[in-house]
Image: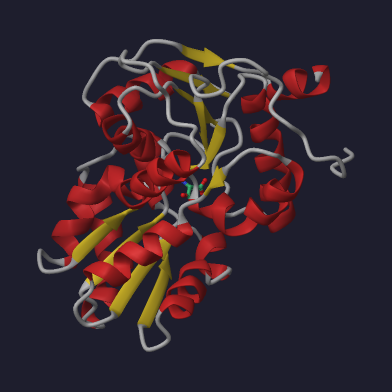
Amino acid sequence: MNHTDKQKPIHQGEVKRSPIGVFDSGIGGLTVVKRLASTLPNENIIYFGDTARVPYGSKSNSTVIEYSIQNTKFLLLKNIKALVVACNTASSIAIPDLKKIFDIPIIGMIEPGSKMALKKSQTNKIGVIGTRATVGNLAYSKEIKKLNDSAKVIEKPCPLFVPLAEEGWIKHQATYEIAEEYLKELRDAGIDTLVLGCTHYPILSEVIQKVIGRKVTLIDSGVASSEVIKSELEKLDLLSDSKQTGIQEYYVSDIPAKFKEVAELFLGKEIDHVHKVDLEVLISER
Ligand code: DGL
């Protein structure tokens, strides 16, 4: 694939009313969509969940970059005006490449989550949980330390949280046991703030909060990023001028019925418009 030319959105007309594109490896990015839809109720959102290739967190950096490029190309076919990388793994690895290739505003999760953690923490002793890739790349430690070099950051990969969330095991006993195993080290370290550094994790936030303790503030990427997305679009004069409530449309690369089931459980409402997309075909047609 030749990535040398910057690719512009293919639409010319009503850019402001074009949808915001959001992608994740699976259902995790819905935690961002949920917040985004309440912060920007008039925006249309096109979501792509790469359910055929989830998890991203255990893949190599080059694979995550390639998948992220393909996902963005697919969303550009839907005329998106801006891209939200609602996946911490892809945000920590692929954003520089995406920005080099695509000529639309691109917003990730790491900077908003880091800023919010520093804002909420009283002690600057911050825990971060994420996929192996996000933690292995020290994405949050680097960003938080860049913003405040006296902060102490402890990171811990929690890879099993992703399949538990994809499975819809929101309050299952097994989820408690796994959370206890993963989080005891962070609890003993006396952190006062915990960044949910994977967009799948807020789906399990009730369990995580119970296990880490009520005194620890959880930082949700969706909450942290939606205000940033709003101000970024405002700055670029790209906010929708429509008075109608926005529509959310969902695309997945595998098993739409399972996505719909877990998404409805998490969003607490019925969702329509879940389409299966054959990425390879769509990309090769371009
Ligand atoms: N939800 C994603 C993240 O924020 C990726 C999880 C995965 O695919 O491993 O990192």
Q: Residue at x 23, y 56 (%)?
A: 208
Q: Which of the two residues, 233 or 129, is positioned nearer the viewer here? A: 233
Tell me which corner region of the image, top left, top right, bottom left or bottom right, holds residue 119: bottom left
Query: Looking at the picture, does residue 9 appear above or below residue 105?
Result: above
Tell me which corner region of the image, top left, top right, bottom left or bottom right, holds residue 260: top left
Instruction: Name, please, the residue furthest toward the bottom.
Output: 150
Q: Quadrant of the C terminus?
A: top right
Q: Residue at x 76, y 44 (%)?
A: 101
Q: How many marks?
A: 0
Q: Is residue 57 visible?
A: no
Left or right: residue 158 compared with residue 137: left
Q: Residue at x 22, y 81 (%)?
A: 188
Residue 102 is situated, as x and y percent measured from the top left of the image, at 71, 40
Residue 247 is situated, as x and y percent measured from the top left of the image, at 38, 16
Residue 120 is situated, as x and y percent measured from the top left of the image, at 22, 68
Query: Looking at the picture, does residue 216 appear above or below residue 61?
Result: below
Query: Looking at the picture, does residue 192 appear above or below residue 133?
Result: below
Left or right: residue 34 compared with residue 236: left
Q: Is residue 204 visible?
A: yes
Instruction: Name, please, the residue furthest toward the left.
Output: 214
Q: How is the image coloured?
A: secondary structure
Q: Quadrant of the N terminus?
A: top right
Tell me which corner region of the image, top left, top right, bottom left or bottom right, holds residue 67: top right
Left or right: residue 72 compared with residue 142: right
Query: Looking at the picture, does residue 153 appear above or below residue 178?
Result: below
Q: Which of the two residues, 237 or 30, is positioned nearer the viewer here? A: 237
Residue 109 is situated, as x and y percent measured from the top left of the image, at 46, 53
Q: Residue at x 56, y 16 (%)?
A: 14
